[in-house]
Image (cartoon, rainbow, N blue to C red):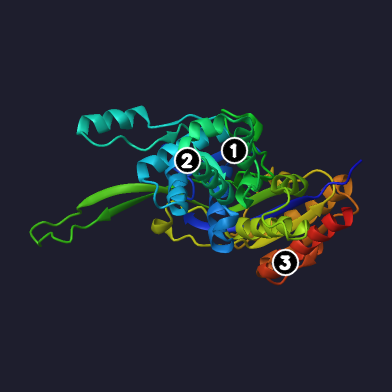
Amino acid sequence: MTSRIILDVHALQSVPPSNLNRDDTGAPKTAVYGGATRARVSSQAWKRATRRYFDTILDPSELGVRTKRVAELLAERITALTPDIGEAQALALAAEVLQTATGSKIEPPKRKVEQAKKNGDAEPAPESSYLMFLSSRQLDNLAALAVEGAGDLKAFLKDKDNKARAKKIADGRHSVDIALFGRMVADSTDINVDAAAQVAHALSVHRAETESDYFTAVDDRNSDAEPGAGMIGTVDFNSATLYRYAALDVDLLERNLGQGLDENEAPATPVRRAVEAFLEAFVSSLPTGKINTFGNHTLPDAVIVTLRTARPISFVSAFEKPIAPDADGGHLEPACARLADWVPEIERVYGDDNAQTWVLRVGPSTAKLTSLGAEAPRLTGLVSTVGAAVAERLERRG
């Protein structure tokens, strides 16, 4: 059996009163697990937070943009290449080349067209009917192709070779975030990208209660003769110690990145950079729901990272029976004790002899986790060490 390279990332993170990810009623999301209601933060919320964190650690050239307004985005690149091309022509060129490259209709939304006619405004810019995810390099190369055929782009793209070039551009040089989180193009499934990263819904390790905060706001212009609030309302919240989990298929990440963002780099270099970026961003990121209301800026109390040669393994089953607070009222220490007992058992039964594990932790409440792997004193060191281990395995495998 061919050896795989799988990265598991587990985190325990205590979050004070907050509403990180709310449902359609405005309440924090929940889920029933082990017969108990748990606080929940959806995988989509944490994936977006991770993607947004990439902006602080990666160059824009290594990232993509996901938007319906992709024609405007591409048109800006076209005019940057050739300033003589006007805005309207650039939009038309962008729509044409995008439609060829992705198979998706790129046209002004009907509701916006009707609204523009009603108001006597100019026709709105063309858009895709769903969010289109393209890398910065793909957009640059599509812009260059559009400029090359600008004289008669329709005829240019009818040429078999040029049409193939457009498709190849849209399906090559994927950005780090596309390689990690995938891309679905409904109208051209052959350029879909399978996600290399999987992110679980974060769950509290204990039963969770949703509470409601009644608040008032005073009108600054009220006089003493006008007592009382200018506004009253309520906001729902909960607090929780969350178990977070993500799995990264490094083999699929390597295939998605292809030869990487720079052809002069060693093959493992772009994969290592993507692995390190994902690990740092997943650990450090935080969904921003109601963040101004609650200011719940915490970081994980403990992180466990395991590099495997078989399938991913989540540790969430350790918390199928909800954690009861310890004598002092906290959930973190008993959660760490539960993991310290449970992880060796799951590894004994299902783990592999070539697995490597690292532990990053904060404070005495997490002390029992030191038995699970090599201790990393800082996040930067953990990220670098894991990245080096991944690169070594890739190079050893050739």
Residue identifier under label 1: 166
Mark nearer the viewer, 2 or 1: 2
Residue identifier under label 3: 384
Q: At label 1, which amino acid type do we have? A: Ala
Outermost residue, bottom side: 377
Q: Is residue 135 above or below residue 303?
A: above
Q: Secondary structure at mark 2?
A: helix
Q: Residue at x 26, y 31 (%)?
A: 115
Outermost residue, left side: 225
Q: At label 2, which amino acid type do we have? A: Ala
**Is the residue marked by circle 2 packed among few (<14), some (14-19), or many (20+) residues within 10 Å?**
some
Q: Secondary structure at mark 1?
A: helix
Residue 359, horizontal then vertical, whole percent: 74, 63
Q: Is residue 109 left or right of residue 133?
A: left
Q: Which mark is residue 128?
A: none
Q: Residue at x 78, y 47 (%)?
A: 251
**In 3D space, how far apart are the residues under numbered discs 1 and 3 (Cα atoms)?**
37 Å
- Foreground of the two, 169 or 380: 169
Residue identifier under label 2: 150
- Foreground of the two, 398 or 317: 398
